[in-house]
Image (tube, helix red, strand yellow):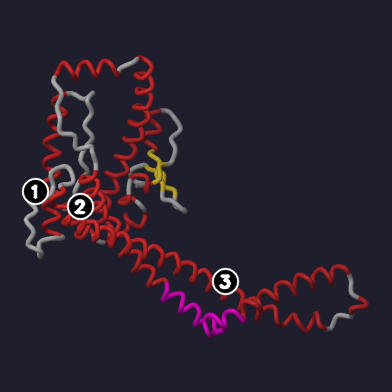
Amino acid sequence: MKRKNFEIKQGMHLAFKDLDLAADDGKQQRFLRAKSLGPHYTEDAIKFRISHKEQYKEMTDNKINKVMTVSYSEDVNLISWKREEYGQITTNSRNWIVDNLFGDYGYDCRDFYNGKLDLANIEIYGMFLEQYDKQKEIISSNDKKIVDINKTMNDIQKHIKAINNYWALKPQLKKFSELNPDNVTGSELTEYRSFRSRLQYAYKMFESSREKYGTLSTKKLKSRQDELKAEQEQLQEKLIELKLASDTWDNIKYNYESKDGWDYTPNKAELTKRLWASRKAKDEIKQQKEAEKAKLKEVQAKNIKRHIRDWAL
């Protein structure tokens, strides 16, 4: 991405800025978070795509898209094209369900998908929803496990630091125990209070480590941390795979329940009438400004997607 003249910002969120676009446009461009392009462009997803190229290609080759919204204000030819695409998407959705979920059941699913929820096949759709809900539960469960592992790893790191501090502070205990309370200076008292506070916290964590992890050895605690990190990486990889695959599940559910699959083409006179009725001067100006912003963002998004795709390949 740097070679393609993008500025990259890594931190809590991976973000890109198209420097060429900024130079051509002459305006200050903002960073675009990669995750705003969709689940396939989070930092973890990009790493997965690079390390599992063949698997990812197979996943995207079998992906089902969403049916497209059809508007009265669109051109008749565009509506006709969308209807054809709609038919193809519905067929692909039906075939995916038959092949992936119901192939072993012997159901005749030819009429399962008709652009709306066919009540005659409500049982089959119910089975699809059961599988859909199970997948979402697995994703949610893995998410929670990863969060819990992160918390445990951070907690172990705190204990390791506290144990090291305890052993570092303990030799100073003798020095402060020999202070004469009747002849202590202000600076010595301040130093002692600071020492006592740090030592008490370290000792508290010291005892907590013994109780929670059964050891006071920082070596064993670091070993446990490494085990958790390996477990976290495995869960993270599985989670990314599930999230990328869930696109198809979400789209099929959307296709069945959405009203965007509108199956009606108005005649040309009706289309023209509705088109002109919607074109008011104020709306045109607003739409033009929004379109310019959207186009600029789309150009940057396309550049990022194209370069990341080439990178993954």
- Could you give the CA–CA distance between mark 1 and mark 2, rounded to whole angstroms? 26 Å
Front-most of residues 311 and 105? 105
Front-most of residues 16 and 68? 68
Q: Is residue 36 left or right of residue 162?
A: left
Quadrant of residue 158 within the rendered picture: bottom right
- Could you give the CA–CA distance between mark 1 and mark 3, rounded to whole angstroms? 60 Å
Q: Which of marks 2 and 1 precedes in the sequence?
A: 2
Rendered location of residue 36, percent (x, y): 37, 45
The residue identified by callout 2 is 60
- From which residue to which does the magenta span run? 207-228
Front-most of residues 248 and 123? 123
The residue identified by callout 3 is 158
Crowding around mark 2 (Cα neighbors within 10 Å: few <14, some 14 to 19, many 20+) is few
Rendered location of residue 10, percent (x, y): 44, 52
Q: Secondary structure at mark 1?
A: loop
- Mark 1 vs mark 2: in front: 1
Q: Secondary structure at mark 2?
A: helix
Please tell me whether residue 209 belongs to the stretch shown in magenta: yes
Number of the label disc, if any, that sits on residue 111: 1
Q: Is residue 29 left or right of residue 53?
A: right
- Mark 1 vs mark 3: in front: 1
Q: Which of marks 3 and 1 precedes in the sequence?
A: 1
Asked if the residue under mark 3 is in contact with the one under mark 1, i.e. CB atoms within 8 Å, the reply is no
Determine the residue positioned at 16% across, 16% down.
269
